[in-house]
Amino acid sequence: MGSEPGQYHSMSLFARLRQDAGRDWHDYVEHEFVRGLDDGTLAPEAFRFYLCQDYLFLIHFARAYGLAAYKAETLDDLRAAAGTMRAILELEMGLHVKYCASWGITEPEMAATPEHNATLAYTRFVLERGMAGDLLDLQAALAPCVIGYGEIGAALKLDVAGRRSTLYDEWIEMYAGTEYQAVRHAAEADLDRLWARRGNEARYPALLETFRAACRLESAFWQMGLDASPPSEGMREAR
């Protein structure tokens, strides 16, 4: 059940969606893959598989922001979509390629990787929501990734202090860092701006279902990495 109209009028739309998504959001941000990133028990083979798929994922999300630009009704919307698309192509993908090089994975290798079914399902869902609906529908589908990764990065960064370093601390820092956090907060502000202009309570249940479906697809994307490799000894012990 979603929040009652007006009950959380002081909350951002994202905060409301996150709260009302309940278990779907929790399962995404507390997934075993995420816990493995945090404590270092994630099998490197699972992470390498994820990194290659995430490269393909980012390409389609850049396309989604191209669609957002097409769907834009105002110059501010157009600028916001172009800015996020540029951030994906020039910041996030650049960081991703550089980071993958430290794992011995080249960009041509990632570009030649076949898309996994989980990658296909999630990226095409987002594009379909954008094509069938308006810009608010598209942003609701994008939010668990664009804003959610920023929240996950910031939360994991808090856990870094007081524990031994792991293979995944640099990945955590990418999403906890100032540049990506700026992308996160801009996306949340854009969502609120769209809601103020185009949203109403009659639309909220459909937006929530889109958001929840995207959270479930995010969980499936994490699970894809785990399924690609047997768990490490550390992760077996943690179960």
Image (spheres, rainbow, N blue to C red):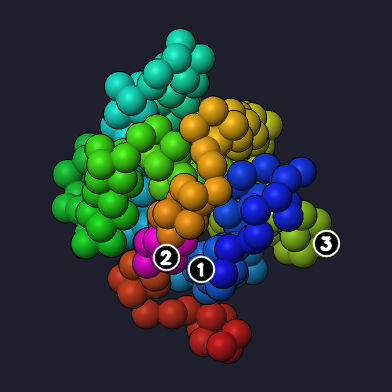
From the top left corner, tell me how far across and down residue 110 is, in percent.
26, 44
Residue 36 appears in the picture as rendered: no
Identify the image quadrant of residue 216: bottom left
Earlier in the chain: of badge 1 and badge 3, it is 1
Location of mark 2 (residue): 216
From the top left corner, tell me how far across and down residue 91 is, in percent.
48, 27
Residues 78 and 224: in front is 78
Quadrant including the C terminus? bottom right
Q: Residues within 10 Å of mark 3 (few under 14, many from 20)?
A: few
Q: Which mark is residue 24?
A: 1
Segment colored magenta: 212-222
Residues 45 and 120: in front is 120
**Residue type at the position of mark 3:** Gly
Earlier in the chain: of badge 3 and badge 2, it is 3
At 65% across and 59% down in the image, what residue appears?
4
At 38% across and 21% down in the image, what residue appears?
72
Q: Residue 213 in magenta?
A: yes
Instruction: Check if mark 1's residue and mark 2's residue have beta carbons within 8 Å.
Output: yes
